[in-house]
Amino acid sequence: MVPIPVPCTSLSYESHIQDEFEEEEEEEINLVTPDSDVSSVDALSIPEGFDVVNVIRDLKVGNAMTKLQEESNNAVEELLTNHIDAVNSFCSEEFECLQGMMEEQSLNIDDADPQPVHADKISRFYKLCHQHQTSSEFKARKQICTELLAAPRDRDKQQKQAMVKSVGGYCIAKARLKHRKRLTNYCFKLGDSEQQQSNEAKCMLKIIDTLAVNESILQTSTQYPESLIETAFRQYQTRGLTNITDKVFQFFISTCDKCLHLLVDENLNIHGQNLFEKCNASISKDMDLFNVFLTSIQTITQDDFMKDDSVVGLLGEMVMISSCSELLFQELSEKFLLVMVNQYRKDFLMNLSVQKKMAHRKQIQVGSQSKGNVKKAGLKIEF
């Protein structure tokens, strides 16, 4: 064994190269313990000035006067009682995303030494915020918090169903007014065609009367009490708006679903100005929808119509009932479709206006950027 000289054991040297890892990561390494997860990252804590509990509590209404305000207060209490941890997690993640955007744009705001921020950085920050709020990641986080409360989603669904019921009552009221005028015009005329028109109007009115129901009876017997909100809200002192039965309400719900499947941009590009006629033809030929309508008028008793003892008279009245039922189905579905088309047209024009504004803004922004690049290049532009 070769002995090692003593001076070699005490050999030392100086180096001008500094270990950056030791200088920068020394504190982080000292914090590592056997129980810690090195791969985990500490989430950004919510600023002290932002109190999630107080922000949510401020959403409560002091004196709830309406059902909507009561539901809002109940939703706030549900969040504060059972889901405050999920809300804190959501806010922490959003603050972390915003902090990352600000650091990317060098928008470190210092209260002690405030500095002006260039407009380009602010515009870039707004753009990043918009991209984040429309991203799938943000929608997934928001959906997790939304699923914690079923009340807001159910309330939106109830409001939409209430609108359908209100529009259905409007369609029936317009049909009743039309055939009442028709009966008034032909009931005292002696011609065969006039009497045929009068009898058909009577049959239509009797069928229509079975589709409507008194408001007081409907409030105690309906299976969908939330659907009465819109009609009750629009009632005047005379309480003259038409209330429909639950079976008729189901018919209009089915009609609404059919209209929503037909009123899409693809069909608009294909049919153009003939969109209403194409949709109306498709709905009028839908036998499933017609069967739903027939179930709503099965409450008609034969005694109301079959007052003729002869076989010919009975067959004639049965044919009249079948014919009027089909005509009334086409009339009500057409009126409801007309309301849906008008709403679709309104939404389409509004969306088109927004797209034009955004395209115009983008064009202005591109033009201003190109002018700025030309000026930086030292070129002189003459108009």
Image: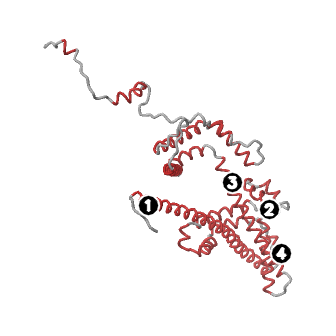
Q: Left of 12 or right of it: where is 28? A: right
Q: Quadrant of residue 268?
A: bottom right
Q: CA distance from mark 4 to mark 3?
A: 43 Å
Label 2 or label 4, whichever lies nearer to me, is 2
Could you tell whether 189 is left or right of 115 in the image? right
* Mark 1 nearby-residue class (10 Å; few <14, some 14–19, many ≥20): few
* Image position of 43 (left or right of 80): left
Q: Amino acid at mark 4?
A: Lys
Q: Nearer the viewer, residue 59 or 182?
A: 59
Numbered circle sitting on residue 370? 1
- Judging by the rendered image, the residue that carries numbered circle 3 is 158
Where does residue 325 sit, x and y in percent of width and height?
Answer: 72, 72
In terms of sequence position, does the residue under pointer 4 or pointer 3 come before the other? 3
Tell me the amino acid under the disc marked 2.
Val
Q: Residue 307: which numbered mark, if any?
A: 4
The secondary structure type at the circle numbered 2 is loop
Mark 2 / mark 3, whichever is N-terminal: 3
Give the amino acid type for the residue marked by disc 3 in the picture: Gln
Where is residue 356 drawn, in percent x and y? 55, 65
Which is in the foreground here, disc 1 or disc 4? 1
Distance between mark 2 and mark 4 Cα atoms: 25 Å
Indicate whether 381 appears above or below 121: below
